[in-house]
Image (tube, helix red, strand yellow):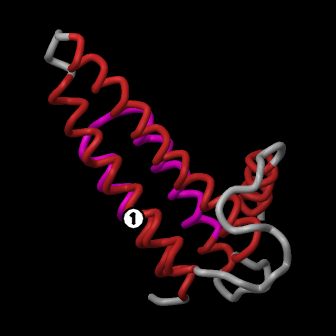
Amino acid sequence: MKIKSSICLFIITCLSGVSAYGHCQVPCGIYADQHRFEQMLEDQATIEKAGKLIAELSGKNDALSRNQLSRWIATKEAHATNIQKVIAEYFLAQRIKATAKNYEKQLVSAHSVIVAAMKCKQNVDGNSVADLKKAIMALHKAYEGKK
């Protein structure tokens, strides 16, 4: 029960003062769950590519390389933030319901994606990006109720 309370508190903290992103929060009933998972995997692939190019460009000292390096860093950050926003504003705010049979597993999986995206912001190693993909796939499985 303590973990459930902690996760709920974390969710409320994340959502405080956050503007709407992606799908609206009007109760229109129009959802594209599969599209959101595909979008997160596309963001993850971009983060992976950015990490490789950041590593490649970091050894170069010319102005163009420095410019591209800063742009790839910003891109990596933006795509990790996109993933976090999809989880918080789409799945946690609208789609993951407390009445679901595997509610706790969905919450834990969603939290894992948010943390994995944060770790991708903090470094450029391939392990973090692989962990992010695994976390997204685990959430998809938990969300769909698959074992």
Quadrant position of the N terminus in the picture: bottom right
**Label 1 CA crowd tier, 10 Å (few <14, some 14–19, many 20+):** some
On screen, residue 74 versus residue 52, left or right, reads right
Quadrant position of the C terminus in the picture: bottom left
Query: Is residue 120 rendered magenta in the image?
Result: yes
The residue sitting at 70% across, 66% down in the picture is 92
Task: Count up the numbered dots.
Answer: 1
The residue sitting at 55% across, 89% down in the picture is 145
x then y, percent, for residue 110:
58, 64
Identify the element where label 1 is drawn: helix
What is the quadrant of residue 75 in the picture?
top left
x then y, percent, for residue 89:
70, 60
Q: Which residue is the site of mark 1?
A: 41
Query: Is residue 26 rendered magenta in the image?
Result: no
Judged by its main secondary structure, the magenta piece is: helix
- Tell me the amino acid under the disc marked 1: Leu
Camera-side residue of 53 and 104: 53
